Image (cartoon, rainbow, N blue to C red):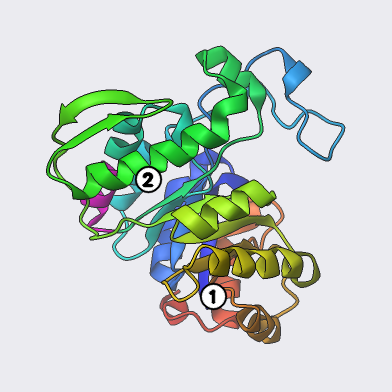
Amino acid sequence: MKFGVPLGLVHPGIWRELAVDADRLGFESVWLPEHLVFATDLSTATYPGTEEPGIRPGTPLFDAPAYLCALAAVTGRVRLGTAVYLFGLRHPFVAARAFATLDHVSGGRAIAGVGAGWYEGEWLAAGVDFASRGRRLDEAIAVARRLWTEEAVEHHGDHFDFPEVAFEPKPVQSRLPIVAGGESRAALRRAARLCDGWISMPQTLDRVRPRLELLRALREEAGRADEPFEVTVHAYELSGPDEVAEWERLGVDRLIVRPWRRTREAAGRLAAFAAEYGLDGAAVR
C-alpha cells in the first residue's frame, strides 16, 4: 500500500516542513487542493449534500503546481499531486504547461489529480460556463495528452480551438498520470474512460465499496479493465495497520491519511504513523 499526505489539511505555514518529513519518513506522495478564486457572494457556495457554505472567501489560495515545484526542490522521492486541480477551468495550454513544468522540476514525480469542480462561484467569476465544466474537462484532458506526447498539435473542439502548435519540453514521465476526482457517475466514468486512476473524497471501507464496484464496471464497459489504473482513497479513520489489508482486497492502491487533528500535532503524528505502519523511512526519525 502507498500512503499519501494531505497538506491542505494543515496550515500552509508548515507545508514545506511536513512535505520534507513525509519524504524522509517514507510516505509515497503529498497532495495539495486547489481553487482559482473565491467569490464573496456565498449564494453558490453550498457544498453538495450540506447546508453550509463550502468555502470561506478569505481563505488563502495558492497555485498548486507552482507550490509543488517549490516542494520538489526540498524533497527527493515523494510524489507531488493535486487533489484536485480544476484542469478544465484553464486553457489546456496553461494546465498542461503547469504540470509539465512540475514534472521537470521534480524529476518525474508529478501526478495531475483533476476534477470538474462543484463551486459555481469561481466559474462565474472567471467568465466560464459552469454547466459545461465536465465537457470542458474531458476535452482539456484529451488536448493535454496530445500536447505532452505529439510533436505538433492542432485542435478544433467544442470548447478549445487553436492552430498547429509545438509544446516543449514534454514531461519527464512517458505518461504523466492523470487521476480523476469526484464520486458522481460522470466523474467515475471520466476516470474509467480517460484517466490513469481515480481519487476519492474522504471514505470508509463500507461507503467506498459501491463506488469501486461501479468503477470496475465502467472500466470493463470502456474496454480498459486490463490497463494500468490506480485507485486512491482519502481514508482519515484507519483503525490500525490490520485494516490496510482490507483496503488492498478492495483494489485500493493508495491511502491518503491524516493521523493528526490539529496542525501543531501533524509532524509528531506523521512520524508515529510511519513507525506504526512500517514505512521505509520511519527509522530515520
Tell me residue 205's x, y (percent): 75, 72
The answer to which of marks 2 and 1 sits earlier in the sequence is: 2
99 left or right of 243? left
Residue type pointed to by label 1: Ala
Q: Which residue occupies 57% across, 50% down? A: 181
121 above or below 218? above
**What residue does disc 1 label?**
274
Tell me residue 5's x, y (percent): 53, 59
Q: Nearer the viewer, residue 138 or 250?
A: 138
127 above or below 10? above
**What residue does disc 2 label?**
68
Tell me residue 14's x, y (percent): 50, 46
Q: How far apart are marks 2 and 1 (CA)?
A: 22 Å
**Residues rendered magenta in the picture:** 99-108
Which callout, 2 or 1, points to the residue nearer the camera?
A: 2
Q: Which of 145 and 241 is in front in this view?
A: 145
Q: Which residue occupies 45% across, 36% down? A: 87
Q: Which residue occupies 42% across, 37% down? A: 139
Magenta stretch encompasses residue 106 = yes
Visible residue check, residue 152: yes
Helix, strand or loop: magenta stretch: helix
